[in-house]
Amino acid sequence: MIPSESSLYLAFAMIGGLAFSFLAFVFFGPLFFRKRIGRKYSYFSDFPFELFDGAESNGKLLTRIFGGAFLLFDLVAAMFLVDAFVFYPHGVFFLALLAAFFHLARVILLFFLMILPARYNKPHILVVALYFVSAALSYILEGIFLIRYSNGDGGPMAMALLLIAFGAIDLFLMANPRFGEWAKMASEQMADGEVVVKRPKYFLLAYSEWLGILLDALASLSLLFAFLLLFLR
């Protein structure tokens, strides 16, 4: 692959922007949540959409900005796939386009996953299921694409295998038989004998969604690193 100098700068900017926006979202979002709601946020029992709960505030606005920037950088990463057929015109167009389609689909579904409350349980579960399927297909197709065009280069090959592994993890999450009991709550008996029903410390659907978001960020970074290594060879 022989890119222009601007492609190299764009790849560096995309990697930096994606990493910064994701880390800012997952680090500052819970801090602003605690200040706004008055309790600690947990990645194991709280849903991503709950980061946007509570009254309007500067912290909530910044959480939206960081989350939106993460989704935007994630979305633009698909551009490298669409642009790839310029460098590899011999039959790569369909594979690149298919990978880009599922990449775009997964980011759009991730947007809805991050804003749709779980109280709308059927739509929320549908979005989660479609997200994990599209994400798994996206990672696997991107991995196959990189394997085909890495020409045996160690760096891009490693990124390709990582992407395929991320796809396998997503499929494993979808196949978890406990998903059918995602709404199961925990109960605790108080000193006065009253039984209080509350969310368990480890809430399957909530932490699965966060794991999906983490894999999404790592997958896009792996894809961008792979293209950067291909640009530099």
Image (cartoon, helix red, strand yellow):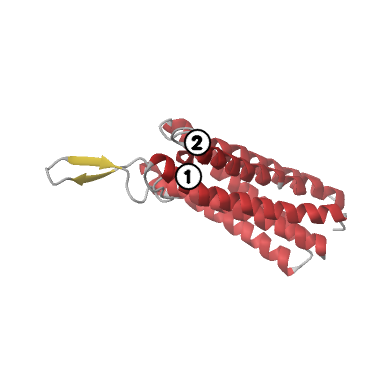
**Residue for point 57% across, 50% down:** 24
Q: Would you say the residues marked 2 and 1 are in contact, meaning their CB atoms lie under 8 Å apart?
A: yes
* Residue 66 placement, left or right of 16: left
Q: Residue at x 66, y 42 (%)?
A: 72
- Front position in the image: 54 or 173: 54
At horizontal 72% and vertical 59% (from top left) the residue drawn is: 226
Residue type at the position of mark 2: Ser
The answer to whether 183 appears left or right of 72 in the picture is left
Residue shown at 60%/52% (left/top)? 217
Q: Look at mark 2 in the image and give the residue it sits on.
A: 57
**For residue 217, which numbered disc appears in the image?**
none
Residue type at numbered disc 1: Phe
Dot 2 falls on a residue whose secondary structure is: loop
**Rendered position, 117 above or below 66:** above
Q: Which residue is labeled 1 in the image?
A: 32
Residue 172 vs 97, above or below: the answer is below
Q: Nearer the viewer, residue 133 or 23?
A: 23
Q: Where is residue 1? Give x, y as percent.
A: 85, 58
**Secondary structure beneath disc 1?**
helix
Instruction: Assess disc 2: are there few (<14), some (14-19) or many (≥20) residues with their C-alpha within 10 Å of its C-alpha.
Output: few
As drawn, is 116 to the left or to the right of 226? left
Residue 174 visible? The answer is no
